[in-house]
Image (cartoon, helix red, strand yellow):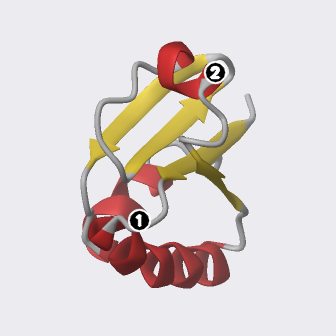
């Protein structure tokens, strides 16, 4: 199954600004792409994924959310959550 990682943010969110470089480091280290989506400009995702706060980062396998991290997530925790679902 395909694993997707999506991080939702909104402009002016301090936690989102702190999360951005962490996401970039993980993308580089794991060789994956993390979709970064503005939740305010894409409100359909708020309902679809029941978003309550930003940042919210989801690890999705197939059509199922396997990991949900709300608020700022430290690099080690986020990387471990993603690795749990990567093949091999």
In the picture provided, is 19 more to the left or to the right than 14? Answer: right
For the point 53% across and 75% down, the residue is 26
**Element on which disc 1 rests:** helix
For the point 52% across and 52% down, the residue is 7
Report if the CB atoms under discs 1 and 2 are less than 8 Å apart. Answer: no
In the picture provided, is 2 more to the left or to the right than 63? Answer: right
Name above or below for residue 43 compared with residue 34. above
Q: Quadrant of residue 2?
A: top right
Question: Where does the N terminus fall, quadrant-wise?
Answer: top right
For the point 57% across and 32% down, the residue is 60
- Residues 61 and 58: in front is 58
**Residue that badge 2 annotates:** 44
Query: Tag 1: Cα neighbours inside 10 Å, few (<14), some, or many (≥20)?
Result: some
**Residue that badge 1 annotates:** 79
Residue 48 picture location, percent across and down: 55, 15
In the picture provided, is 33 more to the left or to the right than 7? Answer: right
């Amino acid at each position: 199954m395909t694993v997707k990682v999506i991080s939702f943010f909104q402009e002016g969110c301090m936690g989102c600004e702190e999360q951005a470089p962490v996401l970039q480091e993980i993308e580089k280290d794991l060789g994956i792409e993390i979709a970064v989506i503005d939740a305010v400009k894409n409100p359909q995702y708020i309902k679809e994924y029941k978003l309550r706060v930003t940042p919210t980062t989801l690890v999705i396998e197939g059509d199922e959310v396997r990991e949900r991290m709300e608020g700022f997530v430290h690099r080690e925790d986020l990387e471990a959550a993603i690795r749990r679902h990567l093949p091999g």
